[in-house]
Image (cartoon, helix red, strand yellow):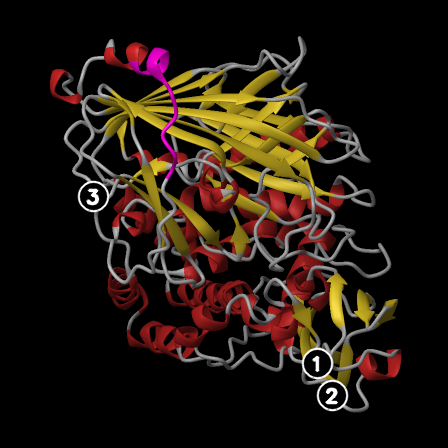
Amino acid sequence: MVADGGRHYYAESRPIRPFSEVFFRVGSAIGQESKRQERSMPMTSRHLAAFAAAIALIPSAAAQDQPSMTVTIRPGPMDEAVGTGFVDIQLTLTADGTAAGAPLLAMPVVLANTESAARNLLNLEAVDARGPLDLIAHDDPEALLFHRHWTATRAVTGALTVRYRVPIDNSPPRRGAGPPIMLRIDGKGFSGAGNMFLMLPETDTPHRIAIDWDLSQMGPDATATSSHGEGDVVLPPGPAGRLAGTVFMAGPMKREPQAVTGNGFSAAWLGQPPFDPRPLMQWTHRLHGWMARFFEDDGEPPYRVFLRFNPINAGGGVALTNSFLTTYNDATTADSIKGTLAHEMVHTWTSNGPGNWYSEGIAVHYQALLPWRAGLIDTQAFLDDLNETASRYYSNALNRVPNDQIAARFWEDTRIRTLPYDRGGLYFAVLDARIRKASGGERSLDDLVRHMIGRARAGQPTDEAAWVELLASEAGPQAVALHESMVAGGLMLPESGDFGPCFARTTKTIPRFELGFDPKSLVGDIKTIRGLIAGSAAEQAGLRDGDIVTYRQAMDALQGDVQARLTLYVTRGDRELEISYRPRGEEVEIYQWTRVTGVPESRCKY
């Protein structure tokens, strides 16, 4: 996953998967009514007599044993050349007795620095057993994560049906770095995460959920899938919020394997990537089976890998319900995204942990180690991955920032955003080595991770207190002290032999990553350069305070590639400029690992 003139196994610099699964746990968050900033937008009543008559035939909530919801998704024609299209949504749900002004429906407005469709819905209408029902929208105060909430102007009677249209536009995201979850058109189809376009009930009450597809406007070759399975699916009772972390894809999809069953592994993509995805997905399928055995998972639920185009942060990915989504651009190779595929796959079993440092650190620790153990990458690929993480971490000017300061600055600065990944990954490497040494090789980090997974499956706490208690019992006070140091921002430095007998620690000098201006300049709807550093590469390339950035690259990938150039398209007055430079500053010494000569390959894997 290192970019160094294409010499390394992962030919593109590894993009960070810049968010934690916590951003998708919306069940309780969207139910909070406190501290709202109310901006009322009454929905005009429409003449919906026929619509209301049909709804009146549906049994009320009181007649049903379990609240239910049916989500009908009707994609319209998708124009890939223009990058526009739409999806019509119909929700029919149990809401009988919900009082006027009480919490009813919600959707994130901004989630993980990514804008949803909440403020762009068209033709929104609602009806219950009494007829048309006006909805009023209220927005939370703007924050890293905030929602739009809809309430009714009168009490709901019987089943509630809501209809609206979601426009899709392939324009680059306005806010900057974020996970690839927005609705997007590729190859006459669309894909996206549920939290980007679905209004969901503001309740934790379990619902029976049906996902229905109407593909009549997409052409005869269109099919549909989601994180929960192929086509129309019915889910057992559970929180409605599980649809928020669901990937949806429809259109003339290509699949691996070509004959998809209801359970197990499959992959889906639209359009034509610049590489043949089929061999890559076969590789991913083998890795998934190996990881399932490693993490002691005997189940075989639907597990989907989704591929889609991303012009901004190609190679990045995001883990979601029973699935993950990874991305490519015109220059992507199959090998270049294997690291992302492995990283996101680890999250399938390890996302229920104490925090970002745990979930992302574990994924970094295992993203090359497990494919290497499985025989799916070679030793050089493992070493390249280790050194890319080490290079970015030890050259990071902010690598001593404590964990409790990361969340507030997560989207402001790529150097902050990468810390849970790099620091966490190296923390687990140090911890693993200490456990192996203390137990004479009988125990390892693998045992602790499986223990935490077992706790999650049993419904037991997997918070930081549980982790620290496990450390104390497994490896004593020194392991607890290491953890406390990591949380406080201490430098995580594995010893020379901590990665086995085949690798030795060394040092080298590289130029430190330095944008040359305040990183917060690239956050928000209008990105104006501020805090330009005199004498920096940015200033020497011609960038100036006050320049407005109209298009930029993803920062996380650049930080890991010493040779990469940053290209910014800016406006200055009535001029449009392209400014390109290497975002590097002072030379610093970093730690790396090299292959020890004379040690046979058979002794390398640990």
Going from the N terminus, do you reach mark 1 or mark 3 first? 3
Contact flag, marks 2 and 3 (Cβ < 8 Å): no
Q: Residue furthest left?
A: 62
Q: At 34% from the left edge and 60% from the top edge, which residue is drawn? A: 37
Badge nearest the viewer, 2 or 3: 3
Disc 1 marks a residue whose amino acid type is: Phe
Specify the quadrant of the image occupied by residue 552.
bottom right
Q: Is residue 227 left or right of residue 234?
A: right
Q: How many other residues sit within 10 Å of disc 1, few (<14), some (14-19) or many (≥20)?
A: many
Q: Which quadrant of the rendered structure holds the N terminus? A: bottom right
Disc 3 marks a residue whose amino acid type is: Ala
Q: CA distance from mark 2 to mark 3?
A: 51 Å
Q: Which residue is mark 2?
A: 533
Q: Which residue is mark 3?
A: 102
Disc 2 marks a residue whose amino acid type is: Ile
Q: Is residue 355 left or right of residue 383?
A: left
